[in-house]
Image (spheres, rainbow, N blue to C red):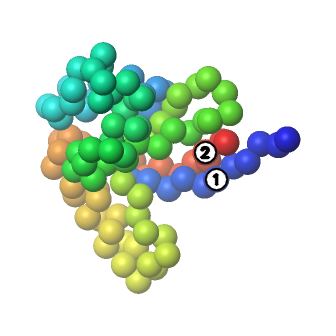
Amino acid sequence: MGVDYTAVLMVGQEFDSYSEAEEFLREHGIDLPPEDSEEMAEGLGEYLYSFDVFGLKCERLDYYSSWDGCVLGWKPNVHDPANFCAQVVEMQTKWAQLFDEMPDIVHTVQVH
């Protein structure tokens, strides 16, 4: 049994936990159900997978340990190099409009 790694490239922000990402969204006026609700029972990542909130995704970075660090944002399509830069600029603009700050371009690994 080994550990697998997958590259993650997203336009957004990295957080040390789902709780921090959820708090960030709430602080910026994004309407989410209460933390103890049925919809949030599986965590922010599953909620955003099931319910569209501006197309945001929350990717957990470590499925191997109990650390629940994550990246909140959008994934540019790396298989479309002709439009890659335009996608990134569009995502940066959208993030700045939603959160009144510029996003990071997060390039890291996901452990599973």
For the view shown, which residue lies furthest in the top direction? 36
Question: Which x, y percent locates residue 77?
Answer: 43, 69
- Residue at 46% x, 26% y is 17
The numbered mark, 2 or 1, whose residue comes first in the sequence reads 1
Q: Is residue 62 visible?
A: yes
- Residue at 41% x, 38% y is 45
Tell me whether circle 2 and circle 1 mark residues in contact (CB < 8 Å): yes
Query: What element does badge 1 sit on?
Result: strand
Classify 10 Å Cα crowding around label 2: few (below 14), some (14-19), many (20 and above). Answer: some
Residue 42 position by quadrant: top left
Q: Inspect the image, locate mark 2, and give the three-letter code of the amino acid beneath it.
A: Gln
Q: Left or right: 101 with respect to 110?
A: left
Q: From this view, report whether residue 63 is shown above or below residue 16.
A: below
Q: Which residue position is annotated with label 1?
A: 6
Q: Inspect the image, locate mark 1, and give the three-letter code of the amino acid beneath it.
A: Thr
Question: Which x, y percent locates residue 26?
Answer: 21, 27
For the view shown, which residue lies furthest in the right direction? 1
State the quadrant of the C terminus.
top right
Q: From this view, report whether residue 80 is shown above or below residue 36.
A: below
Question: Which x, y percent locates residue 88?
Answer: 35, 64
Nearer the observer, 24 or 48: 48
Q: Left or right: 55 with respect to 1?
A: left
State the quadrant of the N terminus.
top right
Q: Which residue position is annotated with label 2?
A: 110
Q: Is residue 12 visible?
A: no
For the view shown, which residue lies furthest in the front direction? 38
Question: Which x, y percent locates residue 13?
Answer: 39, 41
